[in-house]
Structures are given as C-alpha cells and as structure tokens.
Image (cartoon, helix red, strand yellow):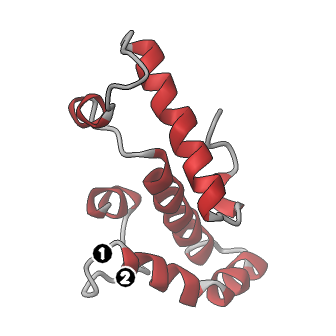
Amino acid sequence: MLLYGCEVWSVRPVDKRSVDVAWNNSFRKIFNACWWESVKSLQFYCLCLPASLLVYQRRVVFWLKMLNSNNLALHALANCCKDSIIGTLEKYRVDRQLNLVSASEYLIKEYF
C-alpha cells in the first residue's frame, strides 16, 4: 500500500526520505526491533530493496510496459519520458548495453 502508484510520483528528496522512514519502521515493527537499530541487514536477508530504490525500479518497469504497449498513446507518452528514464538508469548504473525495448521486467529488477 505504501508504494501504490509510485510509478507516477514526482519524487522530491523530502518525499523519498519519508517513504524510506515508513518502510524502515515497518521492518522494525515486523521484526520487533528497536527504533535505533538499522534495518539494512533485515532488508538484505529478506531480499528487499530500500523503498526509495523500489520507487525508481517500479518506475522503469512501468515505463517499459508503456513502451511495449500496443496502445499508440501510451507508446507516445513512453517516448516522451525516455530521457528521464535513461537518466534514472544511469544514476543507478544499470548496464548501458541493455536493450530496453526487449528487456524483461525480471532483468530490470535484477539490475537494481
């Protein structure tokens, strides 16, 4: 529920921090950890990314689905957003040799 619709959020640093805090607090609650304990090891062993990375990962997957859609309007919108998605991929050092048009959702998630 926390990340519902995050594919279209305009993420400001303050929003990113708020989502990360809520995500981390949920891990603390689930695992009965104290508020001062880091949840990075819990997330690692649960194979979960921080919420801020999940937002960007889901945004790239959403864009990829729009790009590969048969709907011409969605395809045109995806082409308009291509530069920002490429910037996101470069920011997180996703392989530049990756062919985005034919990449699968699983492959994108693995790169993050």
Residue at x 52% of width, y 56% of height: 58
Q: Is there any visible trace of residue 52 in the rendered image?
A: yes
At horizontal 33% and vertical 31% (from top left) the residue drawn is: 39
Q: Is residue 102 visible?
A: no
Q: Position of residue 2 (x, y in %)?
A: 63, 36
Residue 69 image offset from top left, x and y in percent: 62, 72
Mark pair 2, 1: CA separation: 6 Å
Q: Residues within 10 Å of mark 1 (few under 14, many from 20)?
A: some
x and y percentages locating residue 3 in the rendered image: 61, 43
Total marks in image: 2
Give the labeled residue for mark 1. 94
Residue type, label 2 = Glu
Q: Is residue 74 positioned above or below 50 on the image?
A: below
2 and 1 marks in contact (CB < 8 Å): yes
Please state if 70 lies on the left or on the right of 58 as rendered. right
Q: Residues within 10 Å of mark 2 (few under 14, many from 20)?
A: few
For the point 39% across and 9% down, the residue is 32
**Residue drawn at 33 percent across, 83 percent down:** 99
Image quadrant assignment for residue 94: bottom left
Residue 105 x %, y %? 41, 59
- Could you tell whether 72 is left or right of 109 in the image? right
Disc sitting over residue 90 in the figure? 2
Q: Which element carries disc 2, helix, strand or loop?
A: helix
Quarter holding the C terminus is bottom left
Residue in front for this viewpoint, 105 or 8:
8
